[in-house]
């Protein structure tokens, strides 16, 4: 089973990824967890280029292609072989991040971004995608707490960017059946319980089909 987590920065995905991995390991399931961009030697090198603050001259198209290159390596080197071996694969971000951030957020031609993702992920379509949704105000608040910056110093462009990314995720969650939208302003435990319940529902449905 392939499960991905999506959402705006600071939505709490990484905490939920950890909790889900612990839950599956307790059930003695074989689990591998990835964080995008990254997950292979080549992908981690691409990650450091993407997240390097000195690379401020990077244009949006380069960014899109580097995320795609990192993902392509991860899909072929790790995800597809591990799924074939019966592993649960959990990924903190996957191709929907590129659709939301580069497509909706940066405004790169959406059809092209989607076509590129399909080319990259091949058969590795997630079974479930948890979209942990938080309002922009919450993103900015959490960011100011963690990074100790004042809210009024956050540029208006950043707020607009997050609004477009969130809008993208909301559209995806209406369009894609695999998407499960969860209110990320709820407590860690409430979000976790909802995730476990949804996985159980999915597995029961699958068992009934066999
Ligand atoms: P990271 O520090 O891993 O953030 P997070 O913990 O929120 O996932 O940085 C990943 C950043 O890259 C994050 O701001 C989202 C962005 N991103 C894209 O713009 N496109 C993508 O395809 C992916 C995977 C990430």
Image (cartoon, rainbow, N blue to C red):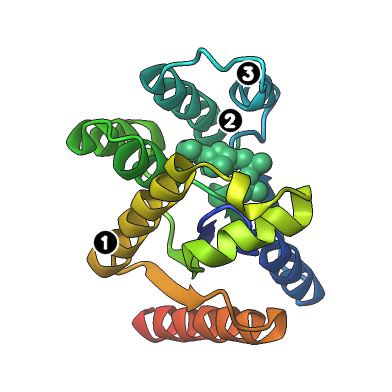
**From this viewpoint, is residue 184 visible?**
yes
Q: Which mark is residue 49?
A: 3
**Which residue bears the numbered disc 1?**
171
Question: Could you tell me residue 4's position as x and y percent?
Answer: 52, 57
Q: What element carries label 2?
A: helix
Q: Tell me how far mark 1 sits from mark 2, CA to CA.
A: 31 Å
Question: If you read the primary sequence from the N terminus, does the residue marked by circle 3 or circle 2 appear first?
Answer: 3
Residue nearest the observer in this picture, 153 or 45 = 153
Element on which disc 3 rests: helix
Along the horizontal axis of the image, is 94 left or right of 196? Answer: left
Q: Quadrant of the C terminus?
A: bottom left
Q: Distance between the residues labelled 3 and 2?
A: 20 Å
In three-dimensional space, the C-alpha distance between marks 1 and 3, rounded to whole angstroms, equals 30 Å
Do the residues bearing badges 1 and 2 touch, measured as CB atoms within 8 Å?
no
Closer to us: mark 3 or mark 2?
3
Asked which secondary structure carries label 1, the reply is helix
Residue at x 76%, y 77% (from the top left corner): 27
Decide: few, some or many residues near mark 2? Use Cα within 10 Å; few <14, some 14-19, many ≥20: few
Residue 28: x percent and y percent? 78, 71
Q: Position of residue 99 (x, y in %)?
A: 35, 43
Q: Tell me where residue 144 sits by quadrant.
A: bottom right
Give residue 103's quadrant in the image: top left
């Amino acid at each position: 089973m392939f499960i991905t987590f999506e959402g705006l920065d600071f939505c709490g995905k990484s905490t939920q990824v950890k909790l889900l991995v612990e839950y599956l390991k307790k059930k003695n399931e074989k689990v591998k967890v990835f964080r995008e961009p990254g997950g292979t030697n080549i992908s981690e090198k691409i990650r450091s280029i993407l997240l390097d603050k000195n690379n401020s001259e990077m244009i949006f198209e380069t960014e899109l292609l580097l995320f795609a290159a990192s993902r392509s390596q991860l899909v072929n080197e790790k995800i597809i072989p591990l799924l074939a071996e019966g592993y649960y694969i959990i990924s903190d971000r996957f191709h929907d991040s590129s659709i939301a951030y580069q497509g909706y957020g940066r405004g790169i031609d959406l059809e092209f971004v989607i076509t590129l993702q399909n080319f990259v992920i091949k058969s590795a379509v997630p079974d479930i995608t948890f979209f942990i949704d938080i309002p922009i105000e919450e993103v900015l608040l959490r960011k100011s707490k963690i990074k100790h910056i004042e809210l009024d110093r956050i540029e208006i462009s950043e707020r607009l960017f997050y609004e477009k990314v969130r809008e993208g995720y909301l559209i995806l969650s209406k369009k894609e059946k695999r998407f499960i939208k969860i209110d990320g302003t709820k407590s860690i435990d409430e979000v976790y319980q909802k995730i476990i319940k949804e996985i159980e529902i999915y597995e029961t449905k699958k068992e009934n089909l066999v």
